[in-house]
Image (tube, rainbow, N blue to C red):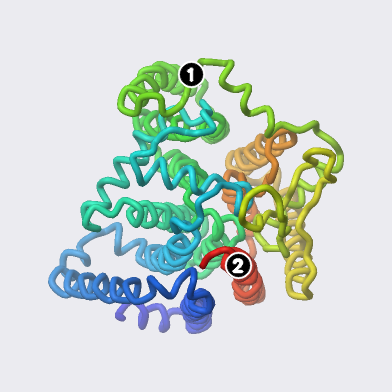
Amino acid sequence: MNRLFSSFEKNKAEFTLTILLFTALIVWAMSLFQMANQFPSLFEAQAKSFVIGQWVLLSIIVFAIFFSWKQLEKNQFIKENWSGLLLAGIFFSIYFLLVSIFNQPAFDVDDIFFDSDAYLWRRRFATELVRDYYFRPVHPFVLIIIRPLVWLISIFLQGNTVYATFLLTAFAGALCVFLVWYFIKHFVNNHLYNLLIASLFGASTAQLVFSSLIETYIFLAAVALLFIVFLIKDKPLFVLVITGLVAFGITISNFGQTVIAHFFIKRNIKQIIIYGLIVTAFIVPLTLLHNFVYPESQPYFWNLSSFDGEGHNQFPPTLQRANYLGRVMVLHSIVAPEPLILQEEIPFLKVWMFRASIKKDPMRIAQYHTLLGNSLAYIWLGFVLLGGFLFLKNLRRQDNRFFLTFILILLFNFTLHMRYGKDTFLYTVNWTYALILFLALAWKEFSDKRWFQISFLVFIILLFINNSQLILTMLSTSALHIK
């Protein structure tokens, strides 16, 4: 309370806008809870235990704070980052609500939401059914990274590994929000601006969806952001190596993003070579260890013939695919459109954003049909163009290491997914953080401008409303199949 009153005395307008932002976030979280409560087949059965659990957790937190406040006050990290931690905590509650709905045992097939393999990964992370039934080599040692964390959390949940996986997924999403806030705080000394950028990121379509589905992607986003934060904090090489190994172990291609960030931010060729050599030296023994702990869980990544199974996800690059992929990357990752509803081979209606041309069916993409969605898409495009203009205007006067890093990460993903992916929205968390951090640095000169702060706050509040409609569509569509 002392900090709040101190903030109020320093800058009444900024304090008021900050309170409005947090109020809007809490109201949004409550509205999502009420929205979910309209679908008893998906949510009501567990509502009581969920609410009771929240009260138990709240009681524990209050008890802990009451008896250890002096210790918390002495903790420099908490003192310096309390607002970012609070923001991440609110998003954690939102993500945990959604992850506990969309990953129930009733969802017993893959590809329901955005071509994700949520059923497969729920089995692999939370049960003893660890075999990848697609038998893919692109996740070389993912299980020895994620499953120990699930087991550790489950100790506090009476051994319930499913809910431990829910918590871990929601925590990874909240960690991404905090790391975005932490990154911007390093470059921009404006409390409100930092919160606005992190809130935009947390409420973006990509972050909202993939913090709510059990998959590998949100963990990849968290690792990528950790790697960049470790670079700006000049962490020792062994920390970067461990982070790079985790990125490679979860999905091979994401190691490329750590190389890009390392090269453009550090610009130390010798260190990059050492980094690459050490990571290369460890990936084979870690893969062998993985398959020793989990025999026959998946093929080794050096078995090149096992990559043949990825052929059904590869498509010829065309101008139309480039157009649609660009729209997914720049627009759909942030502002949710009305998704495609597909009735195909699985016993669920599919909710997708993009569908590649399969079996001579035409390529399709989600559209903005509502006035709110269409308006927000144009406004967001205006913010993007403003960021691009400011970047070019200041090109010669600024440190461009981070700008180039984020541009190359975006181009890396664009090139990769020009050929790979049935629904390219599935991969959005691999680039959404780069897009938002690029723009946040470009908008830096407006961070203290009241008109910009107010405009951005209004945009974010409207984004809450718009992106909630995607969650409503996911709820209403899937509820049709749950008895």
Q: Quadrant of residue 416?
A: top right
State whether residue 137 is above or below residue 370.
above
Residue nearest the viewer, comparing 48 with 148: 48
Residue nearest the viewer, comparing 4 with 315: 315
Q: CA distance from mark 1 to mark 2?
A: 54 Å
State whether residue 37 is above or below residue 301.
below
Between discs 1 and 2, the one toward the N terminus: 1
Residue nearest the viewer, comparing 237 with 479: 479
Q: Where the N terminus falls, by quadrant?
A: bottom left
- What residue sits right under mark 2 in the picture? 480
129 left or right of 193 in image: left
Residue 170 horizontal/vertical position (percent): 42, 57
State whether residue 49 is above or below residue 245.
below
What residue is drawn where x is 18% and y is 69%? 64
- What residue sits right under mark 1 in the picture? 273
Badge 1, how many Cα within 10 Å: few under 14, some, many 20+?
few
Q: Which mark is residue 87?
A: none
Residue nearest the viewer, comparing 234 with 358: 358
Assign a secondary structure to mark 1.
Answer: helix
256 left or right of 98 in image: right
Counting the numbered discs, the total is: 2
What residue is drawn where x is 50% and y is 66%? 195
Q: Quadrant of residue 55?
A: bottom left
Residue 265 horizontal/vertical position (percent): 53, 35
Assign a secondary structure to mark 2.
Answer: loop
Residue 250 horizontal/vertical position (percent): 46, 35
Q: Is residue 186 visible?
A: no
What is the three-letter code of the residue carrying label 1?
A: Ile
What residue is drawn where x is 62% and y is 42%? 406
What is the three-letter code of the residue carrying label 2?
A: Leu
Residue 397 horizontal/vertical position (percent): 66, 46
